[in-house]
Amino acid sequence: MKKTAIRNKTGPTIKEMIITPIAIVDPPLLNAAGLHAPYALRTIVELITDDNISGISEIPGNIDIDAALASARHLLIGKDPFQLNAIRQILENAFGRETAAQRGDAPWDQRKLVHIFSAIEVACLDIIGKVTGLPVVEILGGRMRDRVPFAAYLFYKYEGAGGKLAFGIDPAAVGWPAARQAKALDPAGIVTQAKAMCREFGFQSIKLKGGVFEPRQEANAMFALREAFGPGIPLRIDPNALWKVETAIQYGREMEGLLEYLEDPVRGQENMAAVRKALKTPLATNMCTTSFDDIPGSVSLGAEDIILSDHHFWGGLRASLELSRICETFGRGLSMHSNSHLGISLAAMVHLGAALPQLPYALDTHYPWQWDEVITGGRFTFEEGAVMVPREPGLGVELDRPALARLHQNYLDCGLTRRDDQVEMQKVVPGWTFNPVRW
Amino acid sequence: MKKTAIRNKTGPTIKEMIITPIAIVDPPLLNAAGLHAPYALRTIVELITDDNISGISEIPGNIDIDAALASARHLLIGKDPFQLNAIRQILENAFGRETAAQRGDAPWDQRKLVHIFSAIEVACLDIIGKVTGLPVVEILGGRMRDRVPFAAYLFYKYEGAGGKLAFGIDPAAVGWPAARQAKALDPAGIVTQAKAMCREFGFQSIKLKGGVFEPRQEANAMFALREAFGPGIPLRIDPNALWKVETAIQYGREMEGLLEYLEDPVRGQENMAAVRKALKTPLATNMCTTSFDDIPGSVSLGAEDIILSDHHFWGGLRASLELSRICETFGRGLSMHSNSHLGISLAAMVHLGAALPQLPYALDTHYPWQWDEVITGGRFTFEEGAVMVPREPGLGVELDRPALARLHQNYLDCGLTRRDDQVEMQKVVPGWTFNPVRW
């Protein structure tokens, strides 16, 4: 049968890859690893084809990952952005398959390959969408929903708004709601924050980032939230794996019936499995089962009920859909984890969230805590806690180049090159050190 | 941020679904369930959009599945063929999730939902490819290879060519190679068949469909193949789950080192796991782990090393890619099973085979045993046992409408409505009955 090449002869190839580290204003949020720096780092990746179609993506900022991305540049120039399977193979050959151990103990992930493949895949999907006229969600098999729901993400927090805002020198700071500048260091502060955030964004689920104060205080905050919001709002707490097994069982039992799920109460699959046996409340994780290599252990141990995926850490949107099938196959739920991020990551999360066969839980997002934006047209809006799925081809967001330049200058000025919440915490509490199992 | 609908306003919708059962000439091939009828049944599905783009697919023919497909027609008319996730959900809601038990004991699968979703998904992917200008392989993440290798699929066989050919009334029959009309009922006949098939198609791996004669004879055939072809050609045998555990261990040990893999020696995951513990030869299956619901049992028991997927039975091409990730995650290999089929199924298999991250084994295909074709331009050709991946948009094959009409007439004339190899066998060996565990 005679076969004639068609698209491949005229298909686009990647002619340029631009890696731009940026620093975005971040409030003084507290977590198990310490304190958010005044700036959160992100890296914006832009791939440009020979016919000048641009695809963009956003990943957590880290100078080592940026360098690894740059070292992959020569592997990607000249490649067809439609060949995602081959690109994955090329990157895997170049960077090796990372072990779960390389993830590290911090609440955020530190592996290279998954970040790099996420950056490249999302930018390629943006290009594919623009070439074919399809929103990314439709490249992922189509939209199951038009709105993707997110949860209010509460943090214990010092007073102030972070970055230049924290130093009172950003004239735009007056626009940032006072409620989000307020401190929140006890249950009452958390309830006030929750009310402000739900009023502003319409969230209908609430998560507290715990692992900051001793469990008694944090459990009290959860009961205070239930008291303030009534029974209709799902609640979750994430102690970031800082609790001992007996602590998790004690407070887990106390909060039985209160929580939609308990996220990463303890560290490691064995400990998660032990807590899970003792509780009726479902356990969720983005710290004990964080890669495909962790799935067999998760299955044999029964480590959790819900995996909080993150396309930046699982190697992209298509891999996240594969994870969804694995979760369905093994009776696990799937939802989404987040770090401080801007609208490009949010757009990718929303396209994926819209494509997922089931979406039983509102997704995590730090987005309300961010002030800056790097896309044109301003920041995404939330209605009743949900984001409308973009309908333009690709991700549906475009780079705001003046904003990108400004945020890159922030990066150069702020001197940060990787996230280190312990160093930031030590500026406030001298001698403070991260302890992976604390209570 | 202002978002404007783009594609969805002008996107295609399905305006027609045409289900055409066909009967294709099939030789008198023997297997565990009996004898192939003179015609194999296939069903051709055509979806036509409101802008007259046609997408096609082919699935195993079965009057009950055809009726179920027809009953889904009203659910599909008016739907956007890009919305594969939503279509899967609609069909799952309509037909329910089938249990693994519904697969049945025969070497072929009898579930409805997976067939129906495969038929609809492949036809939709063909449409998506035509709309976007992409070959299906590129909708699946791009081609990992340009040629997809297949294995010679040997059968014990009575003399003749099947169908009208068998009755000597098809004038075209003279074109069918005498070698494939010859009987093959002993090791010498199998070797002759293998040589003819490898000479004609260039296959570089060989599989024997066993479960026909007692194991001594079939093992002898494998040793005769090794003797005839030397050590460079991978060999496999598939007793179609007809052996007892002790038989499988005895002959498995005897053939240790001879086989690339041993396919479904026994019935059920527990028995497969018992055989697997006793042998070094990898075990493959398309009978003990045949659905996502079977995966947890496969993992906990360690039932096999290689899953022989089949997009007709696993619910489509995208589901098969998800299966590939599951296999990678749990250290299993992946290859492909086949039934008697024509070029539309072959095209789908080739697009999927080209997209799979790894392809360590040559795929199964019955294609050389078929005589008819339903696509324009004639039958696919094999070079060194491999098929070139089509480069046209969609599947890259088009319906030959006169051939379709003729093969549908065959269907009406032949009177067969579902596959039943036992009934055919009884015409040759009166009183013969299928026995799911025979030796």
Image (cartoon, coloured by chain):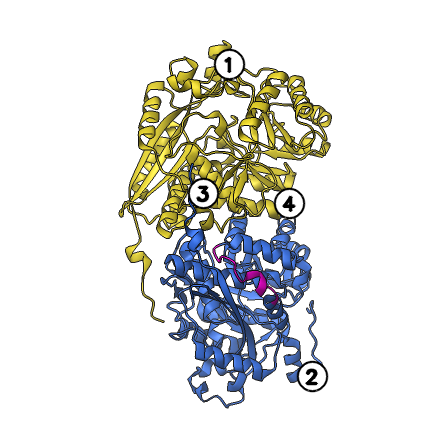
Chain colours: A yellow, B blue
The one of A160 and B377 positioned closer to us in this rendering? A160
Q: Which residues are magenta?
A: B71-82
**Residue A390, numbered circle:** 3
Q: Residue at x 61, y 68 (%)?
A: B65
In the rendered image, residues at marks 2 and 1 fall on the same chain: no
Q: Which residue corresponds to mark 4?
A: A331
Q: Nearer the viewer, mark 1 or mark 3?
A: 3
Query: Horizontal and vertical percent for residue B398?
Result: 41, 70
Residue under label 2, please give it.
B430
Q: Does mark 3 fall on the same chain as mark 4?
A: yes
Quarter location, residue B63: bottom right
Ranked by sequence position, the earlier of labels 1 and 4 is: 1
Confirm whether residue B241 shows in the render. Answer: yes
Residue B239, percent from left and from top: 61, 67
Determine which of the numbered discs, if any, sits on residue A159 in the image: 1
Q: Quadrant of the C terminus of chain B?
A: bottom right
Q: Secondary structure at mark 4?
A: loop
Q: Chain of mark 3?
A: A
Instruction: Check whether the beta carbons of the residues at disc 2 and disc 1 lie within 8 A of each other.
Output: no
